[in-house]
Each structure stands twice: as C-alpha cells, then as structure tokens.
C-alpha cells in the first residue's frame, strides 16, 4: 500500500515490510534510525511535516519528552491517571468540548472503531477471520494516550502495535464524522423529504402513513447467462401462499417481497390511472460512513460521502418510472418547492454504466441522479422490476458482490488491505476475494433448504442415531448376559 495520508504515520512503520521496521524491538524502546531515515526521505515535504507534527503531538499529549519516557509514563500506574487527565484537558480544549463529557465521547469512538473493524472482518471465511480478531488489550483500550503507549511498548508484537494505530485512526475518523456539518443535517433532510412525500399529495389520499401493499416478485433467471433475469411476475398473494411456493421453488427462480405504495397520474393521456411502485429510503450508518472514508482515501467525511441518504424506486417498467418522476415534480410545485435533478446517469435502456466506485459493473442498469426538493438532497436510484432483480441477483452485477468487490479494489491500495495488511495477517487478497464471491453466488443461486426440509433431515438423522444406539445397546446387553452365563 502507499503511505496512508492520515495522522500517526509514525506508528505504521512496522507494517511497511513486516516484521521489519524502525520500531521493531523485543526488549527495549529502540528505533532503527537508518530505516527511519530512508522512510522519511521517501515522503514529500508535506508528508514529512505531518510526520513531525504527529510525533510531537503524541509526546505533547502525554507530557513525555522522548519515546523512552512516553512508554514509562503509560506503563507507570502511579502517574497513569495524571497522564490521561493531561491528555483529556488538551483534547477537550482542541475540540471545544467540556472535559467532563470527553470520557463518554472517547468510549463511543472506541466502540465505533471496534465495530468498524469487526464488521469488515466478518466478510472473511472463518478460517481467515479468526486470525484477524482484535488483540484483547487493543479492543479494551479506550483512551488515545493508552493506545499511543501500546504503539511504543516493546512488550507488544508488531501486529498489536499496528492494531493500536489502526484504532487511533478510526477513533479520529469517528470523531470527525460525528462533527461533520453535513452529517448533522442528514436526519433533518430525511425528515424534510419524508414530510414532503407524505404531505405533498404524492400518494393516494386514502393511503395512511405506513400502509403498504406487500407483493412478491417471482423472477425467472438464466443460469447460463450469469443468472440474468429474463422475466418477472408480480404476485399479489398472501404470505402463506408465498411460503408454499418457496418450498417448491426450482433452481433458476427467486421470490422477492417488496412493499408498494400507489399514486394517481394527474396529467396527460393516462390521467386518473393508478400506478404501484416500491420505494425505500436508506441512510448510511456510522460504520458505512467511516468505511467509505477509508475506501475513498479521504480523512474529511464531507469529501468522501455525498450519498448519506439513498432512495430506491422500483416500477413495473420504464414508462411507469418516468410517470412517477413527473408526478413528483407536479407535487413539488403544489407544495411550493422547486425540484432540481443533477448528476444524471441513465442505463435503463442500454449503455455502459460509468460508476465512480471500485467494483461497480458497467452492465448495471438504473436511472441514478441527485434530487433536491423541499430542503433535502438525496441520491435516487430508479429501476424496473427486471433491472432491480438483476441488481440484487445477477452474477457480476449484484449488490452483494459489489459490496465486497469495492472493499478489495484497487488491488494493492484497497480498503480491506488498509484494515488487514496481507503481510501482517498472512492471506492473499485475490484468493480471499474469490472465495467470498463464490459463497455469495452459492447463497444467491442455490435453492435454500426450507426449514421443514431441514427438520425432516434432522429427524431422519436422529432416528438413525437412535436406532443405532438401541442396536448397540442390545449387543452390549447380550455380551453382558453371555459373560454372566459363562
């Protein structure tokens, strides 16, 4: 990987070429100055200045004058409290918060950092993820001063030192993300958009808030053509009927439940016609936001994240989708708001999708743009039933595959290699990605055994084991009787 453009570069040095590095030591705090000097010369003037600033900051936070003193400060329980109090005062003053509220914030950032790491670790197969578990001492550490001490503590292996640095970096990003001006407006914007949809006459007047019409999309796929969806039947059936269908679902078919709402066309030749669509709002959580900042190699959240709110709209066909967008514009006008659309990408009728994210497929079919209305700016993705099903299930396009691929690309500089450097955790990213994608495809394409089938198999197995045990018991009793007889 390239040198991370993030604070605490000093502490990543052991992971440049594990296990070597300027801080590699077994018994004392020593620095391999020739290696450190070569590394510093490889930095740009700006990166070198950042390195020196962060090195001095680490010492200032703890009140130490050198690396040697820093480690002794952190490990000396008699002065540990005063060191942490000093760091708290400096941090509270820098971020403009009350010292008393800082401990709760640091606990929250530490927990968010742990969650981000464990969430990304969970995508790996179990035989790999086990070695990626956070070192216990790092997972429990909540204060930056303690983590800084671990980085320089000769008792910790290189992996532990790296994980301390990684947690520091993620805590820093969690803080910046929480204090982001745009993130603070997300809930407000989502509320504004929801109010607009409910109050501007978008839906049928008799529709109550939270009232949906649940339908099932029965999709037919071609396994020989990357599991491409060839047709979709919209079924208005009960959950019990759907359950019975799932039991007998053949290979190459999928059933997907969607919750639809209805609107009425108000202008044009189809005036009065009632159309059903599926619409869903999705808000990025903290884990997704921090992970995306790593993927985009941006420390400032607002530069990395422009899609905190995403709305998906699924219509039966392109015509119904266009009618809904026209309907939204009319409702906005009556509501007293202008409506602006920008950054449009339309591949519903063919063409190549040019996504900005690593791992995205050029065959992805959707209408994608940003919509600004009633004080809210959201990312909207429009699909037909077929393009929606393809985005969920088609090989090479499905969102479950995309969610994994974007973490592993670009090769050598991926987010997953930032979280888990291959040399430190001893795995091959290419092989790991191939295995993960293979499991994703199996989960999508292979019929899932219905619970009753699993119960039947379990019952048969239990019966066989019971019969075997009874038979074995008879042999034991016969042997015992024969022994007594003799």
Image: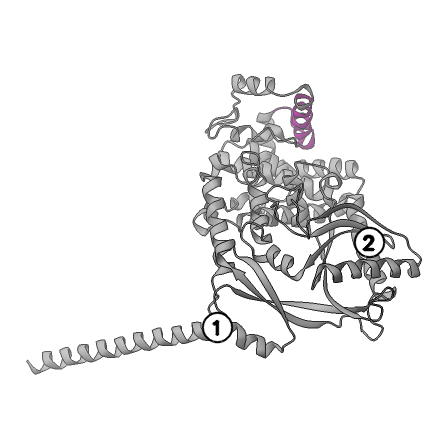
Q: How is the image coloured?
A: one colour
Task: Give the quadrant of the N terminus.
Answer: top right
* Numbered label tally: 2
- Check the image and report above or below for 146 versus 486: above
Residue beneath label 1, please? 451
Secondary structure at badge 2 equals: helix
At 58% from the left edge and 46% from the top edge, which residue is drawn?
117
At 67% from the left edge and 41% from the top edge, which residue is drawn?
356
Task: Give the quadrant of the C terminus.
Answer: bottom left
Task: Say which of 161 and 79 sits in front.
Answer: 161
| Chain-order first, disc 1 or disc 2 | 2
Identify the residue at the far front of this view. Answer: 269
Identify the residue at the far left of this view. Answer: 486
Please say whether residue 398 is visible from this viewpoint.
yes
Q: Is residue 267 magenta?
A: no
- Check the image and report above or below for 343 versus 262: above
Q: Distance of mark 1 from mark 2, alpha carbons?
A: 42 Å
Which circle marks residue 189 in the picture? 2
Q: Where residue 402 sits: x, y (%)?
A: 59, 48
Task: Say which of 103 and 346 sits in front.
Answer: 346
Q: Where residue 412 sits: x, y (%)?
A: 54, 34
Q: Is residue 479 left or right of residue 262?
A: left
Q: Is residue 65 magenta?
A: yes
Task: Say which of 419 and 433 sits in front.
Answer: 433
Q: Residues within 10 Å of mark 2 (few under 14, many from 20)?
A: many
Q: Where residue 465 sits: x, y (%)?
A: 30, 74
The residues colored magenta run 48-66
Q: Residues within 10 Å of mark 1 (few under 14, many from 20)?
A: few
């Amino acid at each position: 990987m390239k040198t991370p453009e993030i604070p605490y570069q000093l502490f990543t040095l052991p992971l440049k070429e594990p296990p070597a590095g300027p801080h590699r030591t077994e018994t004392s705090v020593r620095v391999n100055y020739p290696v450190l000097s070569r590394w510093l010369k490889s930095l740009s003037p700006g990166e070198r200045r950042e390195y020196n600033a962060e090195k001095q900051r680490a010492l200032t936070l703890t009140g130490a004058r050198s690396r040697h003193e820093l480690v002794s400060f952190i490990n000396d329980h008699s002065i540990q409290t005063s060191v942490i109090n000093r760091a708290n005062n400096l941090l509270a003053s820098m971020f403009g918060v009350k010292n008393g509220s800082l401990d709760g914030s640091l606990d929250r950032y530490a927990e968010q950092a742990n969650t981000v790491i464990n969430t990304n670790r969970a995508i790996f197969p179990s035989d790999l993820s086990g070695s990626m578990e956070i070192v216990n001492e790092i997972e429990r550490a909540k204060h930056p001063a303690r983590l800084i001490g671990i980085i320089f503590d000769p008792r910790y292996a290189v992996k532990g030192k790296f994980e301390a640095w990684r947690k520091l970096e993620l805590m820093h990003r969690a803080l910046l993300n929480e204090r982001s001006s745009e993130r603070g407006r997300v809930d407000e914007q989502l509320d504004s958009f929801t109010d607009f949809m409910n109050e501007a006459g978008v839906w049928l007047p008799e529709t109550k808030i939270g009232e949906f019409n649940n339908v099932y999309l029965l999709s037919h796929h071609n396994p020989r053509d990357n599991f491409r969806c060839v047709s979709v039947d919209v079924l208005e059936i009960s959950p019990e009927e759907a359950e019975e269908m799932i039991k007998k679902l053949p290979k190459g078919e999928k059933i997907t439940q969607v919750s639809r709402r209805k609107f009425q066309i108000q202008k044009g030749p189809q005036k009065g016609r009632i159309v059903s669509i599926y619409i869903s709002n999705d808000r990025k959580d903290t884990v997704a936001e921090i992970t995306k900042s790593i993927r985009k190699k941006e420390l400032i959240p607002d530069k990395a994240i422009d899609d905190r709110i995403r709305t998906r709209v699924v219509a039966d066909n392109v015509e119904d989708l266009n009618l809904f967008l026209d309907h939204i514009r009319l409702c906005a006008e009556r509501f007293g708001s202008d409506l602006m659309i920008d950054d449009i990408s339309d591949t519903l009728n063919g063409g190549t999708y040019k996504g900005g994210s690593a791992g995205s497929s050029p065959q992805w079919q959707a209408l994608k743009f940003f919509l600004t209305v009633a004080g809210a700016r959201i990312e909207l993705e429009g699909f037909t039933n077929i393009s929606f099903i393809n985005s969920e299930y088609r090989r090479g396009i499905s969102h479950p595959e995309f969610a994994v691929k974007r973490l592993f690309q670009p090769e050598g500089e991926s987010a997953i290699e930032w979280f888990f450097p291959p040399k430190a955790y001893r795995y091959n990213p290419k092989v790991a990605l191939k295995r993960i994608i293979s499991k994703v495809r199996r989960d999508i394409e292979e019929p899932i055994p219905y619970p009753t089938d699993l119960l039947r198999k379990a019952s048969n197995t239990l019966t066989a084991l019971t019969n075997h045990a009874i038979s074995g018991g008879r042999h034991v009793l016969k042997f015992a009787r024969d022994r007594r007889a003799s």
